[in-house]
Amino acid sequence: MKLDNTYVDKFFNIKTYIYSLTHGLTFVFTKQTNSSEYIIDLNFKAGAYFEKLLNLPNGTAHLLEHLMEGKPNSFLETFAKLDDYKRGNRERARVYSNASTGRSLLSFNSSANIKAIERMCTLLLWKVTDPTFAIDNFLESEKGIVSGEIDREQADKDNADLVYEQTFFKEYTGDFLVKVLGTKETVASITKDHLLLLFRTLIRSDNALLTIKGPTLTKKMKSFVAELDTLLNKDKIHSQVPEYPDRGLNGDFKYKCFKSKQTQGIFISYAVVHNLSRQMDHKQDRKNILIDRFTGWSLNEFLREEKKLVYSAAVVNGSTPIHAAIRGFSTITSKENLPAVLENIYSFIFENGWKNYMFSERGKTWLNDQVSGYIFKTDVGINADYAESKGIDYFLNEFLAYDYDVAKKEMQDMKVEDIAEIFEIRYLQSKPKVWFSSNFAQAEIMPVFKASKLFKKLSEK
């Protein structure tokens, strides 16, 4: 086990170690000395997107996850034995375990009191051993369970998240926008050979990330990591490690009106998209955080308190399916107020309404308050997925080495002009994706939008 990197998080006062193993396993350990819990996560680049690379039916990765996590295996041959192994009693700690599949990753997760660490490690080894036993005994019945899971999903046309992605990002994410569960037809067509091909090709050491967060890394745990690295290298098909598509972003102005029975009023999202940095730029990172907070604060002041048009405005802070950030704002208004809201969004962005807040005495006081909150930090709990999130940053991109002392200095030196620069780049030099969601027909929303100064400005070349 070779130590490749270390990372000291001075905000939380914890240290993370990054190791590489003989057969390619990436191992990330976060030491939280005062913790009474271990959290173990094992991730593979084996999500639904990679099914097409192996010519597998859609849903194969998700079905394999079900069979490896929730079903008896060659070590625990019955549900009773599996349950008994994980359950606690008055003399031993219980073990929680679960698994999930996304477009990118197939993941196994477990947590328990430190007294259960050896059972946690053993259980994970058993899960990722050849799944033939579970496939032979439970394949057809598990297809029925997955079919029931598919029944719970919204139809594609009613799925707001899916329509949003397909509208704004399809041309550069392409076939990455695959359904994770598959369809009833594709799941029914999955065979034992399909499942074993995915297992032997993608569930392997050099395509895996193991993360552990806990109080110490014992000799037995190091032995477990080495054993896992060896096990995941056994009887594998060593094709090229899969990569994600890396296409350029489309910066064009786009818009969509989505009909949703669940939406009260008219929901408006105004967001721009930009590539995520693969390296940590502390000053840029602080600027992005501050401009998000400024936008939320100033639009609330403008649209709610001054204009009395909305109840609130919120920050849009998300990510696209592949390596890009979505940043902007959202609000909800009535049909009657829609023309005025669009007019005032135009005024706020393009007629210097934002400057009236940013460069005012209140704006300067607001900035000083934000800087104060960062310098004089308060206790913040460490997320359960801390080690996993750091590990995935390293596994999928490059390690983002955040240094609280450097970030603190950047915040201390921050000026209003620094924030203004980012506002101009984000809102004056970039074309947004504008999304409307309501229970009104498109014909009632789009003519109002297209008649607005905002639409005409955004449509300029």
Image: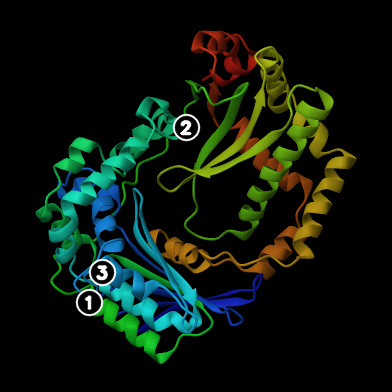
Label 1 Cα neighbours within 10 Å, binned few <14 / some 14-19 / many ≥20:
some
The mark found on residue 251 in the picture is 2
Question: In this rendering, would 281 be left or right of 23?
Answer: right
Disc 1 marks which amino acid? Leu
N-terminal label among 2 and 3: 3
Circle nearer the viewer, 2 or 3: 3
* Dot 2: element: loop
Q: Quadrant of residue 335?
A: top right
Where is 248 relative to 106, above or below?
Answer: above
Label 3 Cα neighbours within 10 Å, binned few <14 / some 14-19 / many ≥20:
many
Disc 2 marks which amino acid? Gly
* Dot 3: element: loop
The mark found on residue 8 in the picture is none
Labels 1 and 3 touching (C-beta < 8 A): yes
The mark found on residue 128 in the picture is 3
* Dot 1: element: helix
